[in-house]
Image: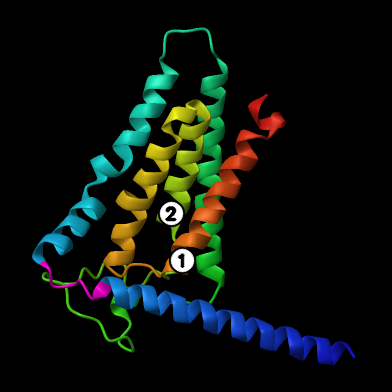
Amino acid sequence: MWLSYYYIAEEWLHTLVAGVQRVDVGVYYFLCGLHGNWFFDRLASFLEDNLLLKSGPILAVFWYFWFRSDEEKDRRTTIIATLAGTFLGLLATRTIALFLPYRTRPIYDTALVSHPLSFPIPDGLLNWSSFPSDHAAYFVAMAVGVVYLSRKLAIPAVLYVTLWICLPRLYLGFHYLSDVLVGATIGLTASLACVHAQWLRT
């Protein structure tokens, strides 16, 4: 009886993975259909490569609330807890990437039919597994802290992480959609866990 359950679970898992892969490839093909467009290619590359504008806005928010001249000390505790959650999320994503089977990034996968970009493909990530996205984990974890510091910044934080961080990496073929979603979930979970951990805040 247990053996039959095992085969059912294995078949269900295989179907799930195949379905996720179909969605991943479909999203990648949709985005890479725009490859070769001078404007879109360089816009995505600019958003991806500009480290100051990638991390600067979130760090500026943290800096502002850290030195804000009021008596609300809990803000600093939230920032420290968020940084701890960010580190935990990165540790989790790198551990998963290390122990799970290597997943080729779509831009390097010769089995996929890709339209070439209008500039040479960067090879710096060739030996790094695509799953899960540590970028998504890092920035989503940081965005959680921004939302806890100011609920008014919730929508800007979501748009920033989605459009500035995640979408360019999907467009350039550095990640599949599932890589980003799983990485974002890890970052969200880790940051929330640390922000709500009373022993850590204490």
**Quadrant where the N terminus lies?**
bottom right
Q: Residues within 10 Å of mark 2 (few under 14, many from 20)?
A: many
What's the residue at 33%, 89% (across, down)? 111
Q: Is residue 195 magenta?
A: no
> As displayed, is residue 184 above or below residue 191?
below
Judged by its main secondary structure, the magenta piece is: loop
In the image, 5: left or right of 64? right
Residue 96 in view (yes/no): yes
| Place of residue 114 in the rendered image (x, y in percent of width and height, measured from the top left) | 25, 82
- Measure how far apart labels 1 and 2 are at the Cα level: 9 Å
- Secondary structure beneath dot 1 equals helix
Q: Are marks 1 and 2 in contact (CB under 8 Å)?
A: yes
| Place of residue 166 in the rendered image (x, y in percent of width and height, measured from the top left) | 36, 56
In the image, 67: left or right of 164? right
Residue type at tag 2: Ala
What's the residue at 33%, 58% (across, down)? 167
In the image, 164: left or right of 149? left
State which tag comes first along the sequence, 1 or 2.
Answer: 2
- Secondary structure beneath dot 2 equals helix
What's the residue at 52%, 61% (across, down)? 182
Q: Which residue is mark 2?
A: 136
| Place of residue 8 in the rendered image (x, y in percent of width and height, measured from the top left) | 75, 88
